[in-house]
Image (cartoon, grey):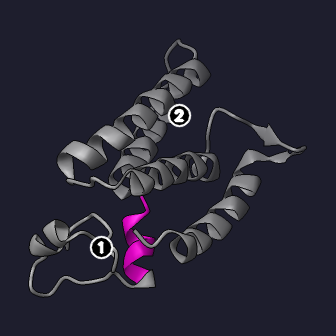
């Protein structure tokens, strides 16, 4: 399955590149394609390595650096590795990465006097389920 979301408004050139079983993506397909799973996996893996490290060092600063690097890498990865050319999809997927980071544990500890993981989880459910309704490709 191609990573780029296919819509009815794709140009004839884009439609010419569709595989025989490809077509307009369903809600479920859009939902899956808007989750930056590879980048989230990298973040969670690095987060586990850093939190398990028992040596000297500022873990919070390092997590900010990791977050920043992966945030910058997200659109680059989508564009060059997965061949996503729709900037709307790249932007929504990059925003999704930020929300996923807040939900799984980020250097931010509280948001609006709530634990950031709690707020992130609420935002994650709402964002993940609503964006495919609005972004059709």
Residue 91 position within the rendered picture, expressed as x and y whole percent measured from the top left:
47, 49
Magenta stretch, main secondary structure class: helix
Nearer to us of marks 1 and 2 is 1
Q: Quadrant of residue 27?
A: bottom left
Q: Are marks 1 and 2 in contact (CB under 8 Å)?
A: no
Category of crowding for the residue at label 2, using alpha-carbon neighbours closer than 10 angstroms: few (below 14), some (14–19), many (at least 20): few
**Mark 1 or 2, nearer chain start:** 1
Q: Secondary structure at mark 2?
A: helix
Residue under pointer 2: 51
Name the residue rendered at 37%, 78% in the picture: 29
Position of residue 39 measured from the top left corner of the image (x, y, whole percent): 37, 47
| Quarter of the N terminus within the rendering | bottom left
Name of the residue lying farthest toward the right: 113
Horizontal side, residue 116 vs residue 114: left or right:
left
Q: Position of residue 54 (x, y in %)?
A: 51, 23
Labelled disc at residue 6 = 1
Instruction: Please state which of residues 125 and 8 is positioned toward the viewer in this rendering.
Output: 8
Q: Is residue 134 above or below residue 20?
A: above
Region rendered in magenta:
28-35
The reply, left or right, for residue 76 in relation to residue 36 is left
The residue at the point 53 percent across, 34 percent down is: 51
Q: Residues within 10 Å of mark 1 (few under 14, many from 20)?
A: many
Picture layout, residue 106 above or below residue 25: above
Please state the horizontal and vertical placement of residue 8, each as a whole percent of the image. 33, 80
Alpha-carbon distance for marks 1 and 2? Answer: 39 Å
The residue sitting at 63% across, 62% down in the picture is 124
| Nearer to the camera, 131 or 73 | 131
């Amino acid at each position: 399955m191609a990573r780029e979301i296919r819509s009815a408004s794709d140009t004839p050139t884009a439609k010419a590149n569709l595989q025989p079983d490809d077509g307009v993506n369903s809600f479920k397909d859009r939902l899956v394609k808007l989750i930056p799973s590879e980048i989230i996996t990298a973040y969670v893996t690095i987060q586990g390595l850093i939190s398990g490290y028992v040596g000297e060092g500022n873990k919070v600063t390092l997590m900010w650096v990791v977050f920043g690097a992966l945030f910058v890498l997200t659109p680059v990865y989508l564009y060059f590795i997965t061949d996503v050319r729709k900037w709307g999809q790249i932007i929504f997927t990059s925003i999704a990465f930020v929300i996923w980071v807040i939900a799984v544990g980020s250097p931010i500890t509280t948001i609006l006097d709530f634990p950031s993981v709690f707020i992130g989880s609420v935002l994650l459910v709402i964002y993940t389920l609503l964006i495919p309704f609005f972004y059709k490709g």
